[in-house]
Image (cartoon, rainbow, N blue to C red):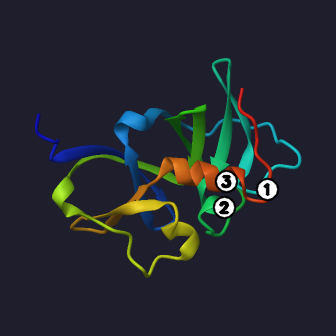
Amino acid sequence: MPMPTTQQFCTFFLGKQFFGVPVDQVQEVIRYQEMTRVPLVPKAISGLINLRGQIVTAIDLRRCLGMPDRKPGELPMNVVVRTSDGAVSLLVDEIGDVLELAQDTFEKPPETLPAAMRATIRGVYKLPEHLLLELDIVHAVGAAETGNGAVLART
C-alpha cells in the first residue's frame, strides 16, 4: 500500500508563528474555558479544565516554547489533542484552518529557531505566506510536565 503523499493539519497561531498538529491527533477545538489552577506544577501548566465531565490538563504553549505570556485580557483558545495518557488541551492564541500539505514540502526544523522551540518541532512546511511549524505533541506535553521536575498526573 503506498504511503500517503499528503497530511492534514489543524493549524493555529502563537503570536506571528504558525503551527500545525496532525488532524488525527486532535479531539476538538474549543473557545476559552475557565481553568482550575493547580499549585506546585510547572509554569507551562495553566490548570485543569472540565470538558463535559472529563478533567483535562491545559498546557500554555507560549510558556512551553519560551515565548512571552499573552497580554492581560487576551484569552487563549483550546486545541484538545489525544495523547497516550488521555486528552490534553493546548492553549493557543488563534485557530487557523485545516490544511492538507504535501509530504515533499516537509523539512527539518531550521537552526534559527530558539532551542526551546526546536526541541518540540518535528519540522516545517514551506507555504506561500509563511512556514508551518509541525508541533511534536509528545515532546511539547513532556516539556510542559517536566518544566521544573514535577509531573501532573492526569485522570
User: What type is the residue that disc 1 sits on?
Assistant: Gly
Q: Residue furthest right?
A: 39
Mark-to-mark CA distance, 1 and 2: 15 Å
Q: Are marks 1 and 2 in contact (CB under 8 Å)?
A: no
User: What type is the residue that disc 3 sits on?
Assistant: Ala
Using the image, tell me which numbered label, if any, was put on residue 63.
Answer: 2
In the visual, does 20 lie left or right of 69?
Answer: left
Q: Could you say whether the residue bearing mark 1 is in a helix, strand or loop?
A: loop
Is residue 88 shown above or below 118?
above
Camera-side mark, 1 or 2: 1
Residue topped by disc 3: 144
User: What type is the residue that disc 2 sits on?
Assistant: Arg
> Which quadrant of the rendered structure holds the C terminus?
top right
Q: Residue furthest top?
A: 53
**Residue at screen point 72% across, 49% down:** 45
Is residue 139 shown above or below 31?
below
Mark-to-mark CA distance, 3 and 2: 8 Å
Camera-side mark, 3 or 2: 3
**Residue at screen point 59% across, 39% down:** 89
Residue 77 in the image: state x and y as whole percent. 56, 44
The disc, 1 or 3, on the residue closer to the chain's N-terminal end is 3
In the visual, does 8 lie left or right of 53?
Answer: left
Q: Which corner quadrant of the image does residue 78 belong to?
A: top right
Residue topped by disc 1: 149
Regarding residue 97, the answer to whether it shows in the image is: yes
Q: Are marks 3 and 2 in contact (CB under 8 Å)?
A: yes
Q: Residue furthest left?
A: 2
> Which quadrant of the rendered structure holds the N terminus?
top left
Using the image, tell me which numbered label, if any, was put on residue 78.
Answer: none
**Residue at screen point 66% across, 61% down:** 63
Q: Nearer the viewer, residue 124 or 3?
A: 3
